[in-house]
């Protein structure tokens, strides 16, 4: 961590302070400050994503789909090839006899990642799509 730190004061209700202290202990943070810094990084990333920041963003798109839907595997693979400039890697996992999960690691502009997620959501047989992104 850099030595160039600004000190701020934060006033919280005791219920939030108690909850913060519990998380600091449970997740083994060195201090409240480190937990708050971690939370703010997530807050800033969410803000950038939701306000259309330019990125680049890095993250994952998790897709759960029905293994037995005819043509779905080909459709997924076609989209993945068409979006190869955004997709860094793909992991395929068999959840059950009927369901599979694919985790796509992505890097790119928010609009590109959103477009990819929407293409995946539109496919028949896709049951769930979750997007998780962070900024640099």
Image (spheres, helix red, strand yellow):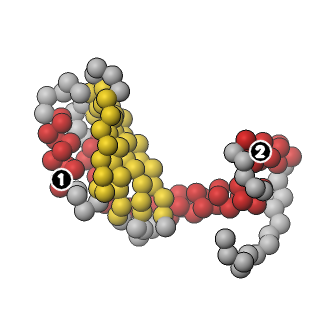
Secondary element under disc 1, as helix, strand or loop, is helix
Quarter of image, res 74: top left
Q: Where does the image place residue 19, in percent across and percent down from the top left?
A: 78, 43
Residue 108 appears in the picture as rendered: yes
The residue sitting at 25% across, 41% down in the picture is 122
The residue sitting at 15% across, 47% down in the picture is 78
**In the rendered structure, which disc, 2 or 1, sits on the residue that comes first in sequence?**
2
Q: Are marks 2 and 1 in contact (CB under 8 Å)?
A: no
Secondary element under disc 2, as helix, strand or loop, is helix
Q: Where does the image place residue 87, in percent across and percent down from the top left?
A: 29, 56
The residue sitting at 65% across, 58% down in the picture is 38
Residue 115 vertical placement versus 125 (above, below): below
Residue indicated by mark 1: 81
Q: Quadrant of the N terminus?
A: bottom right
Q: Nearer the viewer, residue 11 or 83?
A: 83
User: Which label is found at residue 25?
Assistant: 2
Q: Where does the image place residue 67, in percent across and percent down from the top left?
A: 23, 27
């Amino acid at each position: 961590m850099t030595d160039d730190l600004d000190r701020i004061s934060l006033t919280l209700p005791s219920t939030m302070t108690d909850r913060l202290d519990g998380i600091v202990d449970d997740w083994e943070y060195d201090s409240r400050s480190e937990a708050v810094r971690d939370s703010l990084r997530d807050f800033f990333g969410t803000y950038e994503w939701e306000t259309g920041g330019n990125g680049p963003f890095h993250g994952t798109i998790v897709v759960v789909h029905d293994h037995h839907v005819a043509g779905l595997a080909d459709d997924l693979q076609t989209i993945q090839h068409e979006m190869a400039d955004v997709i860094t890697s793909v992991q395929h996992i068999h959840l059950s006899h009927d369901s599979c999960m694919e985790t796509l690691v992505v890097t790119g502009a928010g609009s590109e990642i959103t477009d990819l997620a929407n293409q995946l959501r539109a496919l028949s047989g896709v049951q769930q799509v979750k997007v998780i992104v962070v900024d640099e």
